[in-house]
Image: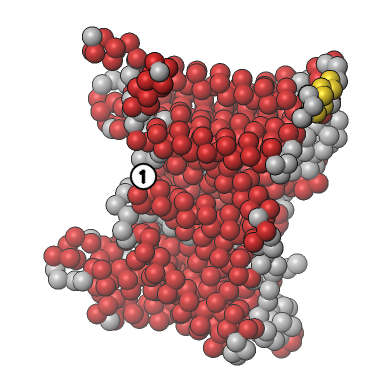
Amino acid sequence: MSVLDAVRGHVDSYTAGERFAAILVGGFVAAVGLALVSGQLSGGYLLFLLGLAGMYVLLSLGLNVQWGYAGLVNFSVVAFWGIGAYSAALVTAPSAPIPLELHPVVGLLVAIVASATVALLIAVPTLRLRGDYLAIATLGFAEVIRLLMLNERWLTAGGLGIAGIPPILRGISEAIPQVRLNLGVARIELTHGLTNSLLEFLAVATLVLVVFLGLRRIQRSPWGRVLRTIRADEDLARALGKDTFRFKLQAFVLGSVIMAIAGVFYVHFNRYLDPSDLMAIETFYVWIAVILGGSGSNRGAILGGLSVIAILEGTRLVNALPLLAGVDIAPLRLFLIGLLVILVIRYKPEGLLPPQHEHIWPEATQEADR
Amino acid sequence: MCALQLVADGVIFSCIIILGSIGLSLVYDIANFPNFAHGDLMAVGAFGAITANTVLGLPFVAAAVVGIGVGATVGVATERVVFEPLDVGPLELLIASIGVALCYRAVLIGGFGSDPRSYDVGGRGRVEALHEATGIAASPRSIAIVASTLVLVLSLHLLLQYTSLGRQMRATADDPDLARVSGIRTRTVTTAMWIIGGGLAAAGGVFLGLDTIVRPQMGFDLLLVLFAAVILGGIGSVYGAMLGGFAIGMAHELTPLVPGVGTEYKAAVAFVIMILILLFRPSGIMGGKESA
């Protein structure tokens, strides 16, 4: 019974938002499990979806650094994602117009350097702008990037796109032998493809974990506290002698590099990239994820990223229901997301998991309790 | 293509941008947020007219009026149902307006599919007399667009300058609190602004559909160009939006004259102008409020 009591005690310490989030995640896991068992969802596709979810989570975490920590209104999320994705694709793919065929690690480094450089170039003039102006300016910048990727065919292959991008763990999955397990009820077959998907999923999961832990540490650091002060009252931060522009610049670059890393990961697991992936709607999805999760909260960004991908991909399963077999899902999905945004802003503008005790060192509260 | 032809194309495109940017500018000033749903409101108007024209079989002119009515109604309804009850900062309003934009587009795609449509009206060929006299190829459709825009813009000017409602609108745009204590019913004025803004946006959408084609994404694709016009003209200034719309529309179409820049970068030129204005003169060329 003591285990049950311990669980109950733990659950009692949750806030209402945390409970709701736990129910949401539990329901999500149950739905995925059900779909997997009933054969609606294959293991390989599930891994693909989880990889996609990991990418959205990374994007949300990156935007959370900019908007959640520092209050910077960046509407060029998809542009930085695209800079990362195109850097990786152009450096590694044999089908790139200028084939270099370097190792994915080189692509990652190029992506980090390129995104940081572009972020600096964009941020230095624009970060002084008012929030709404910054939103419009960065949205315009993202469109310029999209047009460049679409039209500079000598470099990016334009609308044709780049195919045949190698997997990020090139050479490793082939080294692992194929396994066939016959467990009576379930036959598990680990082909090279599935092994590779599994490894890629583990890679993104590790990446998300590392970024999450790193950001959590940063948020509690003096640097994170200065950013929080800037977001609440920039004049106050300046009066305390902080070079607020410098801090905002650092937050902008850090967030943009995280977005670029998400892009690098995406091309290696999707294996194909074209400029239609760079539409502004992708930026809106990431914003919706951060607002839904709770601005400034890393856990919220993860929850928001997962929720958005659950809505985007989960609505595909609606057609599996006999009643709704013929319904066109795309507009329904768009409508649901639009409605969700309006409802969240109306009834819960602080999001599902607003930052509360994550700003405080755990030791500090323990000592207060004692 | 000769420069004169590009200028003519620029005038036509400018008309559409002007109609879109007036409403965007009014709402930006009064409600204090950039309405990301404004582009999709243009599409709503265009589809309203398509329904009246091809489904109900109304003649095009009547259908265009229906489309404008639909745009105005949807604009006011959105303000009453979504924006007015929100008690949040400008950035949250901006995000909410993205949600509204997605809802508009979802309804359009759900109701009409994503295939492009066009109006059931003639007037596609060029006017031969004009072509022989000046070398400009312009269809009767384009001439109708320019003429109608002139009428709409002139009416708005007369409304703003010579009617009581116009004076109240200018006063409210200038200082909402002062207007309210002077006895102006600012809520009525705000409603009037949404009607005018929504109606003009819908007119822009109908004309865009007439000039090119009607599709659900048409308005959103134009949104950043509209923002460029509004920011260039100065937020809240109707005359600024007209001037900004004209300048951005011309820049958009005259891009091929700039050496080394292809037509594929038309929109990019508008965005770069916008970013430069934001950096160096964020109050716009009309300097903000005094002309309302």
Label 1 sits on residue: A349
Foreground: B94 or A142? B94
* Residue at 71% over, 82% down: B124
Q: In this orientation, does residue A263 appear?
A: no
* Residue at 60% over, 59% down: A331
Foreground: A121 or A289? A289
Percent from the top left, x then y, of residue A238?
29, 26
Percent from the top left, x then y, of residue B16?
55, 70
Foreground: A22 or B156? A22
Asked where in the image residue B187 lies, by quadrant, the reply is bottom left
Quarter of the figure that contains the N terminus of chain B: bottom right
* Three-letter code, disc 1: Pro
* Residue at 36% over, 64% down: B81
Task: Indicate left or right for A44 with A119 as reference.
Answer: right
Foreground: B37 or A210? A210
Percent from the top left, x then y, of residue A92?
79, 27
Chain of the residue on which disc 1 is drawn: A
* Residue at 68% over, 44% down: A277
Quarter of the figure that contains the C terminus of chain B: bottom left
Element type at mark 1: loop
Q: In this orientation, does residue B207 appear?
A: yes
